[in-house]
Image (cartoon, helix red, strand yellow):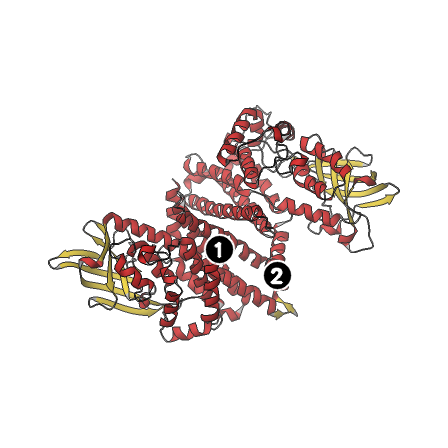
Amino acid sequence: MNASHPLPVNYENFREAIRDFLSEELTPQLTRAGELTTSVFSDFEAGRHWQRILHAKGWGAPEWPLEYGGTGWDIQQCYIFLEECRLANAPNPVMMGIQMLGPMLMHFGTEAQKVDFLPGIISGEDVWCQGYSEPGSGSDLASLKTTADREGEEYVVNGTKIWTSMAHYSNWIFCLVRTDKTVKPQAGISFLLMDMATPGITVTPFSSLDGEIEQCQVFFEDVRVPAANLLGEENQGWTVAKYLLEFERGGQHFTIDLKKQLRKLKDRVSSVSNAASDDPTFSFRVAETEIDVLALEQTELRIKGSLSSGENPGALSSLVKVSGTELGQRCAELLVEAAGQRAMPWQSDVLSPTYAGPTAAPAECVTTMAEYINSRATTIYGGTAEIQRGIIAKHVLGL
Amino acid sequence: MTEDQTLLQDAAERYLRENYDFNKRRENITQGIYRDPEQWQAFADMGWLALPYPESLGGLEMGSRELAILAELCGRYLVTEPLIDSLAITSKVIAASDQAPDLVPAIAAGEIVPIACIDEMAGSRSVAPATRLERVESGWRLKGEKPWVSAGASATHFVVLASGADGLAWVVVASDAEGVQSDHFATHDGRGGTNCRFDIAINDAEILLTGRLAQLALEAYRELAMALSSAETLGASQAALDTTVDYTKQRVQFGQPLASFQALQHRMANMLIQIELTRSLVYAACNAADNDSADRARYARAAKVKASRVGREVTQEAIQLHGGIATTDEYIVGHFFKRITALESWVCSRGEALQEFMALDG
């Protein structure tokens, strides 16, 4: 599909082409959804709409290989695309299918599975959620208890998953389930793909601290799943999941958003009407933070360099995850501090892109508190900061 | 790294590992030998003292990135010889002067060791030094005081920043000349510092740069000094972490190696994270300087701020994670801590760098 949209290789021309596309296709309502994004998820409908537009252009999953509908762009082009999308306030589509499941299907899937699932992922027609954590299994994921018992050509699944982001919008879920209780925990796990419409699956959404609903608990009661929906071999699920975790950690570009936050912080420093303008220490703290962001940006570039030359950045991605999320938290904290009481008003629906009523908070502070609240989750999901430090200690320092 | 950079790094690392012994260093310091003549000659023979100068002056035309390789190794091996000190002042001040053809080859050969004298008692760091270069009947006279000159005891020549008739002036004088009073003192980072007092006749040949050229040379010197002190801090921090990791793997308490305790593992992981972030910024600062990019001033200052903060945190942690042994003089890790502390305020402090960074930001 993308072959019909050849792009110049010159990076500046490439960037121009992306900008032209964005300014043409991003409607005010879509950019509004982008501006109002306070976590990794934008307004669901806006994100889905945007994914359809990207897909029609042939850019539904830029990083995927050409044969599966990717673009064939190099690492730098993919980065420029992402950067321009973020700077233009494009909304985020739900990315679990594209970023996580897609690469797994390509690596471990049967031909039939690839044909069945990849087109729906890239088009945005299918929305996938990730069923990993359970109420009793967070960082110690391998202790998970949801079971899948083989009965003929089916698995019968029982148990529950939690922190299943966007499950209430999803029509598919990829899950880690226990298929053997007699072996050591990691060796008895399998990777199953389930249609959310299957009888026995119920979804209970719950509110996050900011009052928004992104998170769900999913319950499975005698859910019958075709054995053909097993990804990889039975009991090979941990291997599949580890590959997946690498995708979740690697290739993240924190500095694009951090620089957007810094720009806001500098606006606060130079504007008269906020708590920061009365505090002489504030601009020093912003400058210290900016220097840390520069250091992270250069580290991301180093990783990109080693990826480009075919090396495995390994535990450097843990380093980037820890620093990127902690710096994001620091920026969010400074923004709340600058806003002071202006960030405190809470209104339901105010973060919906279709909301047109009056806002209790000043326009520039509407998302501030929600961003701060949601930033606390960033060092918890995708492998906690403690797990990442453990990885660094073990794999880099050899402790 | 380029192939040439890898070669330089490997050769320099091998030399220092095999020939720069920590215990010999301690012995030298005790005897007041801060620049071992044999070491200095070896540095010259390996081409280190000729690294950054143009070929026309007998130099190797290498950039900040290559100097940073040496600076990092100076940090790791706690080199007390004033290597980055003399490279920085030579490449940015002496090499920019008309006297370069006379002085630079002798410096590269190790015969002349120049050390910069900038700071003054009043703290009026460089804007308007109270040290003056005055016109007198017979020529010129340099009058003033320069205290706390790091590695001053290792100098054969001082390169003095003074106020002249048309702004700043750089003047070079032999350290043993009559009219130069040098009071040496030992420093906590294993060097010999000097309080200098100048009241000396100066001829035209001793005035290196004046006016706008002197100002530009000062800025270039400070910027290079920021990058190189950051690189040396980086090297010392990495060495402090490596030492800590090795030690905690061996030291057994409560029946198990200290390294097996998660509370300590995470602290060492933090040290590594901060060191790698610093490394990215130090190399970016060097590359920005070598490419003469528009960001070069910002990156040099960012590197200085980051390296100062991280160097302090990492070496303090290194001492804490070792325990009592690290507080002894015969154990290496406390020496990284001391050297980093000295580097923090050498030429430019962390606070100055931060303020300059903010001013550049516009």
Residue A12 higher or lower than B116, as above or below: above
* Residue A232 locus on image (x, y percent): 76, 45
Whether residue B179 is visible here, answered yes or no, is yes
Q: Chain of mark 2?
A: A
Assess disc 2: are there few (<14), some (14-19) or many (≥20) residues with their C-alpha within 10 Å of its C-alpha: few
* Residue A84 locus on image (x, y percent): 53, 34
* Residue type, mark 1 in image: Glu
Looking at the rendered structure, whether the residues under marks 1 and 2 are on a common chain is answered as no
* Cα–Cα span, label 1 and label 2: 29 Å
* Residue A16 locus on image (x, y percent): 50, 31
What mark, if any, has residue B178 been given in the picture? Answer: none
* Residue type, mark 2 in image: Gly
Using the image as rendered, state which of residue B277 and residue B311 is in the foreground. Answer: B277
Mark nearest the camera among 1 and 2 is: 1
Whether residue A367 is visible here, answered yes or no, is no
Using the image as rendered, state which of residue A144 and residue B118 is in the foreground. Answer: B118
Residue B12 higher or lower than A218, as above or below: below
Which residue is found at the position 23% from the left and 64% from the top? B197
Q: Secondary structure at mark 2?
A: loop
Instruction: Kindly identify which residue carries mark 2.
Output: A398
Instruction: Kindly identify which residue carries mark 1.
Output: B3
User: Residue at the right extreme?
Assistant: A152
Using the image as rendered, state which of residue A229 and residue B356 is in the foreground. Answer: A229
Left-right relation of A59 to A142? left
Q: Secondary structure at mark 1?
A: helix
Assess disc 1: are there few (<14), some (14-19) or many (≥20) residues with their C-alpha within 10 Å of its C-alpha: few
| Location of residue A122 (image quadrant) | top right
Q: Chain of mark 1?
A: B
